Image (spheres, grey):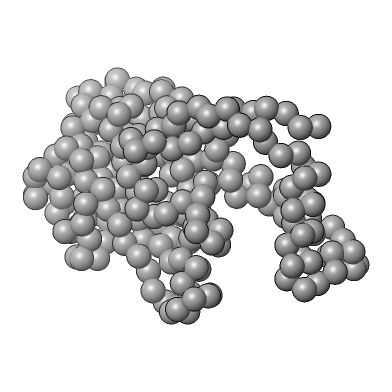
Amino acid sequence: MDTAVLGSRPTDSGLTNPVERRRPSQAEAEAAVRTLIEWAGDDPDREGLAGTPERVVRAYEEFFAGYNEDPVALLARTFEETAAYDEMVVLRDIRLESHCEHHIVPILGKAHVGYLPAGRVVGISKLARLVEVFAKRMQIQEALTSQIADSIQEVLKPRGVAVVIEAAHQCMTTRGIRKPGVSMVTSRMLGSFRDDPATRREFFAMIGSPRSALHES
């Protein structure tokens, strides 16, 4: 049965605003997959494809689960008993799986996230989870990088945030220009990471990122 659901649309800050929209039913989604199979030139009723529409819909529920999660709530629980720790906190090599919003094909890579605490810290698993929340939406890498960094800055209010993403886009490795082995590097530097070259250099040294990223923002 069709129902009205509350969806989320990313804003420039990386957080979300609620948008009321009608979500198609599972039957409608499966019918759309059948149409695409037929458009591709195959028979959706043949044995090998008979269950494909349902499987694709279930896969989409996993691929785009980030639309159902709130990054603000995710970062809400913080810890102030840090023994006055005020040095860099870095989580590197976070596995990243997303989908290009232009072709809905995979973006595969890793994210590195760092921040300078200002009296409180967040559990490190929450940083990895934040990456996943935004990655499991239809994305472009530039926006994904900004959304992660801006959310940490707005919720935790640290002295600075740094995010670097290195990823391969199958929209250019398996179709179009077909250039395998190419990766894209994006970064977002806020606060001390943007203003202090020494802090920025320390972060890039810790993650072992390409020197070219030192000049990106």
Asked whether 168 or 116 is in front, the reply is 168
Q: Residue 119 in the image: x percent, y percent?
A: 23, 23
Above or below for 143 versus 182: above
Asked whether 196 or 147 is in front, the reply is 147
Above or below for 139 versus 78: below
Q: Total marks drawn?
A: 0
Residue at the (9%, 50%) spot, across then down: 197
Q: Is residue 92 left or right of residue 157?
A: right
Asked whether 82 or 160 is in front, the reply is 160
| Quarter of the picture holding the N terminus | top right
The answer to which quarter of the image holds residue 195 is top left
Q: Is residue 139 left or right of residue 57?
A: left
Residue at the (52%, 46%) spot, across then down: 137
Q: Residue 211 in the image: x percent, y percent?
A: 19, 65
Q: Is residue 14 visible to the viewer in this orientation of the structure?
A: yes
Residue at the (51%, 50%) spot, across then down: 138
Q: Residue 124 in the image: x percent, y percent?
A: 39, 37
Residue at the (39%, 74%) spot, across then down: 182
Asked whether 170 or 119 is in front, the reply is 170
Q: Is residue 85 visible to the viewer in this orientation of the structure?
A: no
